[in-house]
Image: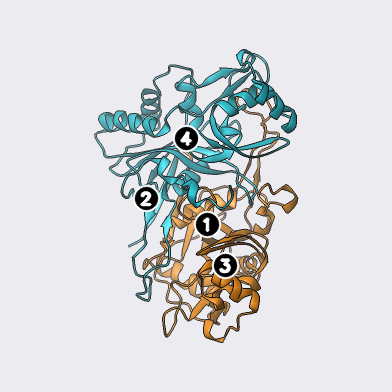
Chain colours: A orange, B cyan
Amino acid sequence: MTTSFTVTGVEGVPLIKPGDDLAAILIAAVGEQDIQLLDGDIIVIAQKIVSKAEGRLVDLSAVDPSAEASKLAEKTDKNPQHVELILQESREIVRSKPGVIVVEHRLGHVLANAGIDRSNVEAPTDGESALLLPVDPDASAAALKDRFEAHWNRELGVLIADSVGRAWRLGTVGIAIGAAGVASLHDQRGDPDLFGRPMETTVTGHADAIASAATLLMGEAAEATPAAVVRGVVRGEPAPARSINRPKAEDMFR
Amino acid sequence: MTTSFTVTGVEGVPLIKPGDDLAAILIAAVGEQDIQLLDGDIIVIAQKIVSKAEGRLVDLSAVDPSAEASKLAEKTDKNPQHVELILQESREIVRSKPGVIVVEHRLGHVLANAGIDRSNVEAPTDGESALLLPVDPDASAAALKDRFEAHWNRELGVLIADSVGRAWRLGTVGIAIGAAGVASLHDQRGDPDLFGRPMETTVTGHADAIASAATLLMGEAAEATPAAVVRGVVRGEPAPARSINRPKAEDMFR
């Protein structure tokens, strides 16, 4: 009768380099850890290693900042090359202040600095490289899911998780920027509540909550747990992570 | 070597009424489910049952809306009594549009409709009652922690979880509005990354992520799992949930 779920960190993953076969590396790591995957398991993978494998590492010194980037870099006290990449990866600047540029990413979600990471990234000298988000993380998740399902012969879900800040709360939490085989949103509208009255609104951020759970194990410092297996959570009606983005017409803060 | 954590739903909790001894009821439910608590376990409790036990259910027909509430109710197409309660529970209106009033709650966090819930609430007639957040959920969490620790003789954490919407993403996720014995924020600033470079910024929203994980089991419809036991997650340096609120001086959206 007890309902529970488990989140298990996938450890022993080597440093990922551009062009690495990430599916093969994760399959090996899960195998070495002796985790037997079951139908319904969800594999959550840190954005960083997906981006690295896909060659999204950029040498900052090779970036030529535009006039717009240089101006915004001065205003925000940021590296002009970094700002140039932020602009290239974004559709719109939502807000900016020293240290932070909040944008609508080309993938459609609103976040700080276009998710461009300068930590845990190989660089000969400090600050010379930056890691962009995957080109199409929903497609990356779908491709990884196909490989995992072919190898394990199980029905699986895959999420690509990023850690993001929030407008009104301190601290980062995990969100799903790529999803395959998992409900991005879990719609309970219309289900009766405990007293038989229809629910007012209950669409849960299912994939984001799973990503948040996984990031409790996937430490951001020198902890090297870039993936986790979530077992026992409903997968629901699969939908890509881009369907989580609130349509701009509903946005009260732009 | 494997790192993992488990989230187990606490079921069989009866409908909670004003004045109920919630600690005793949860202790009984955990006992009936034969969960043996261990040092470090975190008990996550849905805000709804804490509010109900604390008598935060309000008969809407007894609420007299102010002129300000009536005007805002018209603008937002909401029930004037409901809007009056939202105003009473808030410090400031941040945004409003039909169906939604985003406020800074008197507890300091920014959310829609002051977290005042009209579902899963006993009411003789539809729409006549509303459930306010606990008066001081950090204090409620601390009191529950004391009771739980006295009963089980273990060092425990307690979180009170609410489900909230987000500005730029669809779907609700769990957040911690009350915390005792758990780190609200987990500060990894200064830890070196995998390459020995100091991290740029890594304060994780630890309590919110745990609350999100727990709400994956604590369904909002007729599922009656109003609490969960989280085992295997770092508790960290305890701090109240109110410390998660971003200071207004840092707010880019007000």
Which chain hosts label 4? Answer: B
For the residues carrying marks 1 and 4, which lies nearer the camera in this image? Answer: 4
Report the mark closest to the observer, 2 or 4.
Answer: 4
**Is there a contact, CB below 8 Å, between mark 3 and mark 1?**
no
x 47%, y 35%: residue:
B107
Find disc 1 in the rendering and name its residue: A38
Label number found at residue B233: 2
Label 3's element?
A: helix
Q: CA distance from mark 3 to mark 1?
A: 11 Å
The amino acid beneath tag 3 is Phe
Is A248 placed above or below A138 here? above
Q: Which mark's residue is nearer the viewer, 2 or 3? A: 2
Is residue B136 or residue A9 the one in the foreground? B136
N-terminal of the pair, mark 3 or mark 1, is 1
Q: Quadrant of residue A40?
A: bottom right
Q: Quadrant of residue B62?
A: top right
Indicate the amino acid at tag 2.
Val
Q: Amino acid at mark 4?
A: Leu
Tell me if mark 2 has few (under 14), some (14-19) or many (20+) residues whose alpha carbon lies within 10 angstroms of its own: many
| Residue B107: mark in rendering | 4
Q: Who's the residue at 54% across and 72% down the image?
A: A74
Mark 2 vs mark 1: in front: 2
Q: CA distance from mark 2 to mark 3?
A: 27 Å
